[in-house]
Structures are given as structure tokens and as C-alpha cells.
Image (cartoon, rainbow, N blue to C red):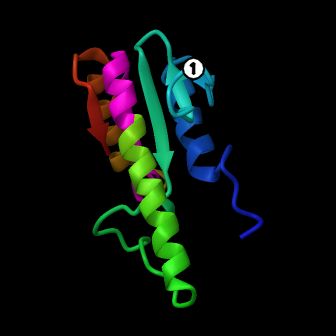
Amino acid sequence: MAAIRSKDTKPEVYFRKLLFAQGYRYSLNSGRVPGHPDIYLRKYNTAIFIHGCFWHRHEGCRYTYMPKSRIEFWQKKFDTNVRRDYVVRNELQESGIKCLIAWECTVKKMKRNQEERERYLKIVEEFLKRDGTFLEI
């Protein structure tokens, strides 16, 4: 578990590179924005979080599993993460900041398949241009 990082994970770095290649400029782990998002697009007033399916409990995902040992510890940890995500999302909404959550499994699909990558990038682009407040991909 010591090798698990909170910043600059592989899915996060990949997603950032895609955004940069599309011409988007951003700041990383901005302390001025509630929840310290992985990516903050100031021009679009949008916070982007790259959530790991295991840690943030992506429902129905094959990467979301319960460890066999210390179940009570893990359940408490996962519940705390999910609760914090909900609070941060509400804080962003109250602040008028749009929130985009990209799940780890989606980023992995984007890595494997160019059509998926283009489809999701189009979804992100449309979200940034419209007035929506929350999107999960």
C-alpha cells in the first residue's frame, strides 16, 4: 500500500496529457478550490477529479472489490472516502464550480481504444461548453 500515490497517478497523468493535447490549460491540485481537484480548468470554472474505482467505490465496476482481510477497517475507510466525495461535490456546487469525475476504468478504456478516447473527449468538451454542474464519466 505504500506505493499508492494521491497525486500524479497513471490515469491522472494520461488524462492531463489528453486535455493538454486538446489545447486545455489547467492547474494541478489547486488548494484554492474545494476538494483540491486533480485538475482545475480556470477558464471553464471546472474541477476534474480522476477517481480510482477501488478507493472511491465505483458502483458496478470490476475494480471495486472488498479486500478479504480487515473488512471493518476497509469498510470504514471506503465509507469515509465516499462521504468526503459527496461533501466536496456539494461545496463545489455551492461555489458555482462545475465538477467532472472521470473514473479509472473509463480512463483505462480510453487508453485501450481510440474510438472510446474520442467519444469521451467529445463528452468532456460538450460539458465544458454548457452550463451543467456535474458529470461522471
Which residue is depicted at the point 55% across and 76% down?
73
Q: Is residue 29 above or below residue 26?
A: below
Rendered view: 79 above or below 26: below
Magenta residues (range):
89-107
Whether residue 49 is visible here, answered yes or no, is: yes
| Residue positioned most to the left | 131
Q: Nearer the viewer, residue 20 or 102?
A: 102
Q: What residue type is labelled 1?
A: Tyr
User: Mark 1: which secondary structure?
Assistant: loop
What's the residue at 50%, 84% (across, down)?
Answer: 71
Residue at 28% across, 16% down? 129
Q: Name the residue under label 1.
A: 26
Front residue of 34/13: it is 34
Residue at the (28%, 36%) spot, across then down: 135
Residue 89: x %, y % from top left: 36, 35
Q: Residues within 10 Å of mark 1 (few under 14, many from 20)?
A: many
